[in-house]
Image (cartoon, rainbow, N blue to C red):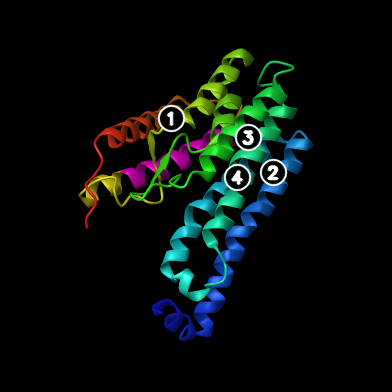
Amino acid sequence: MNTLNESTNVSLRQKIAGWLVHAFTASGAYVGVLSLLAIFQGKYILAFWLMGIAIVIDAVDGMFARLIQIKVAVPKIDGALLDNIVDFFNYTIVPVFFLLVSNIIPEGWGYISAFVIIISSAYQFTQVDAKTSDHFFKGFPSYWNIAVFYLFFWQMHPWVNLIVLLVLAALSFIPIKYVYPSRLDYLSETNFPRLMMLLATIAFGIASGLLLWLYPISNPFLVSISMGYMILYVGISLYRTWVPVRMQV
């Protein structure tokens, strides 16, 4: 009843803002299509830049949605469903296509790895508590675009790359809680660790962008920042899996 009353009192400005936020979220799928085109044309660096833009859209659209109370502004649109559709496309389908057309895994294993990744991602995305009540991802959160970026950047042996991908797919079924970088409410009981994690995430994004800008030239300092963040991310995720912050009632 409260939601109905609120929806009838929504201003035109708030409704327009709500629709613009949903359009912004949906635009991530268009960026994903451009990524597919770049991959098809062999423009891998451009494709990674576009994947990065899609990540940025995904990182900030939720903040905008909460800011304008989007469920009140546009109650007939399921923003969470829209977000999941766009995320599955950008975080799974686009990087899987990259695996199929590039040579970073052994020849003949592209179709098998694509099948494994899609099935594991479908499971991870559709769990009732895929995003837990304390704002963590349960199971490897299908960051396949980030995974293929690292495998492309490191230029490791294709068999090593395949093993890494299969391990990540298996982790989708293991109920480890992974940090949700844009929802840090239950990362800590105090604000300082949350702020530090947010700043570390921003530093990681900047370092990764600079590594892509400099490619094929590497930079040890940027690599250290990027890998240091990954270690921090996994470490905090494991810690909070076994030592969760007590939720306030």
In the rendered image, the quadrant that contains the N terminus is bottom left
Q: Judging from the image, what secondary structure is the residue with disc 2 in?
A: helix
Q: Which mark is drawn over residue 118? A: 3
Amino acid type at image mark 3? Ile
Rendering coords of residue 36 (x, y %): 72, 42
The Cα atoms of the two marked residues, 4 and 2, are separated by 14 Å
Q: Quadrant of residue 180?
A: top left
Point out the tag, 4 or 3, that comes first from the N-terminus.
4
Magenta segment main secondary structure = helix
Q: Which mark is drawn over residue 35? A: 2
Magenta-colored stretch includes residue 189: no
Relative depth, front residue between 202 and 111: 111
Relative depth, front residue between 29 and 3: 3
Give me the residue at 53% from left, 73% from top. 74
Tell me if mark 3 has few (under 14), some (14-19) or many (20+) residues whose alpha carbon lies within 10 angstroms of its own. some
Point out the tag, 4 or 2, that comes first from the N-terminus.
2
Tell me if mark 1 has few (under 14), some (14-19) or many (20+) residues whose alpha carbon lies within 10 angstroms of its own. few
Question: Which residue is labeled 1 in the image?
Answer: 174
Relative depth, front residue between 11 and 128: 128
The Cα atoms of the two marked residues, 2 and 1, are separated by 30 Å
Relative depth, front residue between 151 and 175: 175
The boundaries of the magenta stretch are: 197-212
The Cα atoms of the two marked residues, 3 and 2, are separated by 18 Å
Amino acid type at image mark 4? Phe
